[in-house]
Amino acid sequence: MSHVSNRPATGTATLRAGLDGVLAGETRLSTVGITGVGLTYLGYSIEDLAEHATFEEVAYLLLYGQLPTQPQLKAFRDRIVAHRGIPPELCQVLERIPSSAHPMDVLRTATSMLGTLEPEKSPQEALHVSERLLGIMPGVLLYWYRFHQSGQRIDPTIGGDSIAEQFLWLLHGRPPEALHVRAMDVSLILYAEHEWNASTFTARVVASTLSDFYSAITAAIGALRGPLHGGANEAAMELIDSMRDPDYAEARLLEMLAKKEKIMGFGHRVYKSCDPRSDIIQVWARKLCEATDLMLLYDISERIEAVMRREKKMFPNLDFYSASMYRSLGIPTPMFTPIFVLSRVSGWSAHILEQRANNRLIRPLAEYVGPEPRPWQPLESRS
Ligand code: ACO
């Protein structure tokens, strides 16, 4: 009997480790690394969005495909705020997750739990679920954090009218300064969307099986957690924290590079000469470090950047200067990657919608490198 399949004849398909450079599908949501175009979300440059937009406008753009009018933006903001409440069953789960857990695991678990309490009953509910996730995420993270830090059960429904403001408000237990809210807003805008990166690809693979929204987001959070992806902002902070001054940082970095160690917050799979988001966040990092007397931290960061450019021709990605900016906002390091989630939920959601609108199961091939076919060995004859 002959076995018929879609598999290309041996040698005709090209294997690219890590799918490097492989076109895996289409998107209208963002451009990454296209010469002469820069980074755009649905055609709007990241520079314009970071200068003029709020995160909520950007999230609306990603979810609905166009910038909102004033009434649309107000209604969207109101819906997000109305989605802040945490069901009591989820509060109980948050209280039982150990205080030693990583906050990324808290968000992953909470997303999955919410999917059992408020399941997506039909694809028509997808936009509702994405707005619910945008609304509930900051409160979930900080309910868990504040409960385990001080035994307080915070009210997750308060905190101003934006995600940036609410995050800082719930974290510090008081209304944040306007400058800090704007810095946070810009950071959320920069993290919102980035084409077919590892976590977005994960979300799209799950969506392509016609699974539910929560499963796709839960899986994406798991993919983002690693230090080669979203976890790099925390790893970058740990690196900067381990340096006492710029000269020491330079000497340590040369040692690390001599040992071929990776420097977190540098390099990118697609960008080859710069990450356009880094220039924007670096300006904010400097501004806030100056305002909060953290210039030593900033100077160390700049020296690390200079050494990486000189020795490796490598440039900082978004994660590197995000670290010192978050520190200047008084954000604990384990919260850095979760902030990425609060923002990227918008991009992941838009990609799930895009995948569903023109779905085909994502199922690539692997080149087989295992043993030749061999006869079955009964248990008693194995040595
Ligand atoms: N520090 C030192 N050397 C590096 C770094 C780095 N950060 N990144 C790449 N290199 C070197 C590698 O050691 C390798 O050198 P070799 O050819 O001599 O062995 C070469 O550059 C190619 O590296 P790869 O890891 O194969 O490149 P890839 O395209 O797979 O990596 C990645 C992209 C994963 C982002 C990589 O640059 C990296 O690990 N950076 C640090 C982690 C990081 O900052 N991730 C955040 C990404 S952006 C984001 O998620 C917002």
Image (cartoon, grey):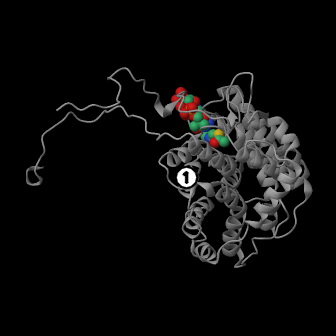
Image side of residue 318 versus residue 7, left or right: right
* Residue at figure coordinates x 32%, y 23% from the top left: 10
Specify whether 226 is left or right of 135: left
Q: In which quarter of the image is ligand 1?
A: top right
Please identify the residue farthest to the left as the structure is shown.
381
Residue type (three-letter) at the residue carrying disc 1: Ala
Question: Is residue 263 in view?
Answer: no
Q: Where is residue 365 in the image (x, y as percent from the top left)?
A: 39, 34
Q: Name the residue under label 1.
A: 216
Rendered position, 303 above or below 332? above
Q: Nearer the viewer, residue 321 or 168?
A: 168
Give x and y (percent) for residue 122: 56, 58
Q: Residue at x 70, y 55 (%)?
A: 342
| Res 252 quadrant in image | top right
Q: In this view, does 370 lie to the left or right of 256?
A: left
In the displayed structure, 143 sits above or below 181; it is below
Residue depicted at x 64% and y 78%:
88
> Looking at the picture, how far across and down is residue 161, in whole percent?
84, 62
Q: Quadrant of residue 100?
A: bottom right
> Where's the N terminus, which quadrant?
top left
Q: Nearer the viewer, residue 309 or 210?
A: 210
- Taking depth in this image into account, of 87 and 298 the one nearest to the observer is 87
- Mark 1 secondary-structure assignment: helix
